Image (spheres, grey):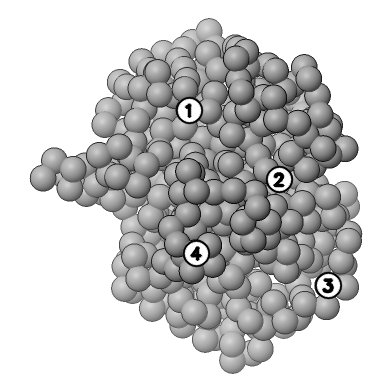
Amino acid sequence: NLHVSKPTAHSTAPVAVRASTPLMLSSVGDGACSRSAEHVNQGRKVPRRKYGIQRNTRLPSSVPIVGLGCSSFSTFFSSDDSDVGGPLTVDAVSADLPIVQSWIATIRRAVLARGINLLDTAPWYGHGISEIVVGYALDTILVDDDHINHQLHGNENAKRKRRGSLPRSSIIVNTKVGRYEADPLHQFDFSYATTMSSARRSIERMNCGYIDVLQLHDPEFAPSMSILMEETIPALIECRNRGWTKAIGITGYPLEVQHEILVRCFEVFSDEVVFDQSLVYCHNNLHDMSLFGDRCFPMTEGDDEVESFAQYCRRSNVCLMTAAPLSMGLLTNAGPPSWHPALPSLKKACDNAAKMCQARGIDISSLAMLYAFSQKEVGCTLIGMKDINQVDVAADFALRFDVTDDANDGLRQVLSDEEYEMLTLLLHVHEGPFASVWSNSEYRWDGKAEAKKFWAMIER
């Protein structure tokens, strides 16, 4: 029932989606990949932005403007297991498998060659496989450190020796709690005990000593707000107190759910700052900039003055990351997957936008990524990259930005004249391809409704 302001030429609208689905660079048009295939910037490391410094010292002081979304390192979003000889499970995964070797090489390329040292994973991704693969890769990247390795007493995996050269502090490892198994009956668990055991298991799987940001995963699916306030969040605070995580984050589709939780935490945990970071997806893209543009959250209870979610986070010292700048396949030449929850009108609008770009020799996915990277209030945009080529493609896009120079950190300086003209056409509030869905409030779908559908299915 929140009021959503109408978008302007620089403020698109809010959207929701199949939870936790990342952008995969395989969604980027062939033209974008082929133009980057020469990798003229090969070996150059991506730019970084200031992040936690001064505002929140529990977070890294800087982050790469593009981060590695690690759901790609599993068969989570693939219907074909032929590459791994059958279904890949936590019991069957091994560092010796060719596909796993490829994933390890991809992570190494991102971290060591391109400076993409932020890894975002979750127990939900591959139902444990992604975290295990990240651990295999970190074993080859990080220096062996007995103090870090044995932080969890009695941990058998802590005895795994690393053979790399980088210190643990040089890598940002983020994971999540709350969403786990494929079986709908066991998919979500927000209890205190499971949250604690999940955090410990993640550290063991990744052999990383501690987690940089431990995130509450898709809280819109929690059966009640009370379980979050009474069990999940106290467990997250305990993890931080024990040194299992440096910082606490929240992620999920509906901005109103994130906002409600953040506000409630200030009321319930008045003596403790709970959340340090918010990860937002599908709200920082060409058709939906509601993260910044929708001023619909009261600044104080009963106050008529309202602010955007980004403004609220800034005022509350919560740092922002985003994901899914291609809106889960909507902003691609190939179009979205069959399960995408967008309304037909939005799918049509995105298809029209892609065709407009194609007619001028511009790849909409390339433009969408550059648009997302340009938002200075976002520290890092997460992208799924499943192989070395996709790492280099993403890094080359990021290298268009020079974030050390404000004069060269805006789209006018980054885009070609043709790209900038096309962007202006796409974002025209009255005549652009999204004008109709913006005016009819069909630019988004209801993330809370998707959660209600899930629980209705369980109850049947």
Tag 3 residue? 39
x and y, in percent, of residue 62 in the image? 78, 38
Residue at figure coordinates x 54%, y 49% from the top left: 93
Residue 325 shows in this picture: no
| Mark 4 or 3: the one toward you | 4
Q: What amino acid is labelled 3 in the image? A: His
Q: Are marks 2 and 4 in contact (CB under 8 Å)?
A: no
Tag 4 residue? 85
Residue at figure coordinates x 82%, y 55% from the top left: 114
- Mark carried by residue 168: none
Tag 2 residue? 137
Q: CA distance from mark 1 to mark 4?
A: 29 Å
**Residue 148 placement, left or right of 353:** right
Q: CA distance from mark 3 to mark 2?
A: 24 Å
Q: Are marks 1 and 3 in contact (CB under 8 Å)?
A: no
| Mark 2 or 4: the one toward you | 4
Is disc 1 placed on a helix, strand or loop? helix
Is disc 4 placed on a helix, strand or loop? loop
| Position of 321 relative to 78 (above/below) | above
Q: Residues within 10 Å of mark 1 (few under 14, many from 20)?
A: some
Tag 1 residue? 198
In depth, the one of 233 and 99 nearer the eye is 99
| Position of 261 relative to 113 (above/below) | above
Quarter of the figure with residue 51: top right
